[in-house]
Every structure is written in C-alpha cells, then in structure tokens.
Image (cartoon, helix red, strand yellow):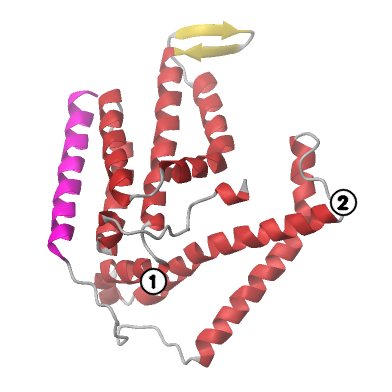
Amino acid sequence: MLRDITLGQYYQTDSVIHRLDPRVKLVTTVCYIVSLFVVDNFVGYILAGLFLALVVKLSKVPVKFMVRGMKSILFLLLIALIFNLFLTPGEVVVSVWKLQITREGIRQAVFMAVRLVFLLMGSSVMTLTTTPNQLTDGMEKLLGPLRVVKVPVHEIAMMMSIALRFIPILLEETDKIMKAQMARGADFESGNLIKKVKSLVPLLVPLFISAFRRANDLAMAMESRCYRGGGNRTKMKPLIYQKRDRLAYGAVFCYLVLCIAFGKILL
C-alpha cells in the first residue's frame, strides 16, 4: 500500500505538461481545486473530469500509475461516503432500523467521492510532472510580491519543496522497516482494524529517528556548502514565460469561467 502513494513523486518523461512553466502548473492546480468547490451539479463535474482527462493525456503519465495512488484514500473516501449517506437530511429513500438514506445524501455522497478523487489526481499531476527544484522556483516567483511585507518567501518555498521531496523517501524507509520487522516475526496483516493499528506503533520510533537523522544530515550539508536563502540568489535556469505557457493560462481561465457559469446557471 505504501508504494501506491504517488503524491510527491516525479514521473520523468517528455510531454507538453512537463515543459510548462512551474508557475502555470501551480496556478492551474489551485484553479482546478477551486473549480471543484464551485460546481455542484453533474454537468460541472463532467466538465472537470474532461479537463482532468485531457491534462493526464497530455502529461503522458500512465493512467494505471495515477489510479494506483487512489488506494491511499480508500479509507477516507469510505468514511466520507458513509457520513454523507446517513447524516444528510432530506427525502428518505431507504430506511434500515434507525439509519436513513436520503436522496440528498446519495447526491452529496457521490459528489464528495468524485471531488476527492479529482482533487487528489489533479494535485498528483502537478507533482508527477514537476521536479522539487522547479516547484521551489515557481512558488518563490509566485509569492515574490509578499517580500514587500517582510515574508520569507524563499524559506517558505524551500520548506514546502523539501516536504514534498521527503514523502517518497519516508515511504520507502517505512517499507524497509516493515520488511525488517516482518523478517523478525512481526505481523501487520492479521487481526481486526484496532490490532492492525496497534501493530504499526513499533514502526513510529525507528521512522521518527530516521526522519530526524535525514533532516539533520540535510541541514549539515546545506550549512557546509554555505547555503543562504534570500532574494540575492541567482538561478541557473531563470523562469521565463513561453507561448505555450500563455496558451495554458488562457485555457485554464476559459475552463474556470465555464465552471462558474455552470455552477450559477444549473445550481
């Protein structure tokens, strides 16, 4: 299951999405997330699904690779479905004992499930097609105006980039620790849910120790190379908008306008 988490990983290939400016991909991801909360009807979600399918197709990332990442949110998805099904008031469709399923609950549960899946896949496209260095440069450029109010833009962008980069590393480390403990007789599969959760507790101590060790090594490496963040640093590859980036901005703007229009007309 740990290997099924794709968030934070980079899939290396040559595609139009990979060649886009990281600022475009960051803005597109934010706009797409906003659009998922703007629309509240089937037509809007169909439009969001078509837009996501087009982006995934252009990114050349295998669909199976992205769908595999959905396994990590199955439990969260199941909880959201149950809560929306049984706790949303409205016209009762099915009644079992004290539990009631309403027409509004079914509609809300379906929309919530679609929204979660689209949100995770849309965010995954950004991380799968953008390297951590590109994400850092893009976030720093976008947040640049905040320097006027003394916000440490470079440090914030660097911390977010390192956090994303450490996700696959920590997952790999967790997998190694689990295999080492399973070789010594540990059992992580049998038993009920509570027993499985308790069996994962011994993983936390070595995982935290490994994470702190890696963070300390990274800090020492940066200090030994006299790393200093800030606005005076130059870039080997400065970000410059190309024609394809402007076209991408136009496409995202049109998509967002359509979502807002559908959300207001068909609400």
Q: Secondary structure at mark 2?
A: loop
Residue 148, percent from left and from top: 25, 76
Q: Secondary structure at mark 1?
A: helix
- The residue where tag 2 is placed is 185
Image quadrant assignment for residue 146 = bottom left
- Give the amino acid type for the residue marked by disc 1 in the picture: Asn
Q: CA distance from mark 1 to mark 2?
A: 41 Å
Q: Nearer the viewer, mark 1 or mark 2?
A: 2
- Could you tell me if residue 191 is visible in this image? yes
Other-residue count near label 1 (Cα within 10 Å), few / some / many at <14 / 14–19 / ≥20:
some
Q: Is residue 266 highlighted in magenta? A: yes
- Work out which quarter of the rendered image holds the N terminus and state it: top right
Image quadrant assignment for residue 131 = bottom left
From the viewer's perspective, is 252 left or right of 202?
A: left
Magenta span: predominant SS is helix
Q: Residue at x 61, y 62 (%)?
A: 170
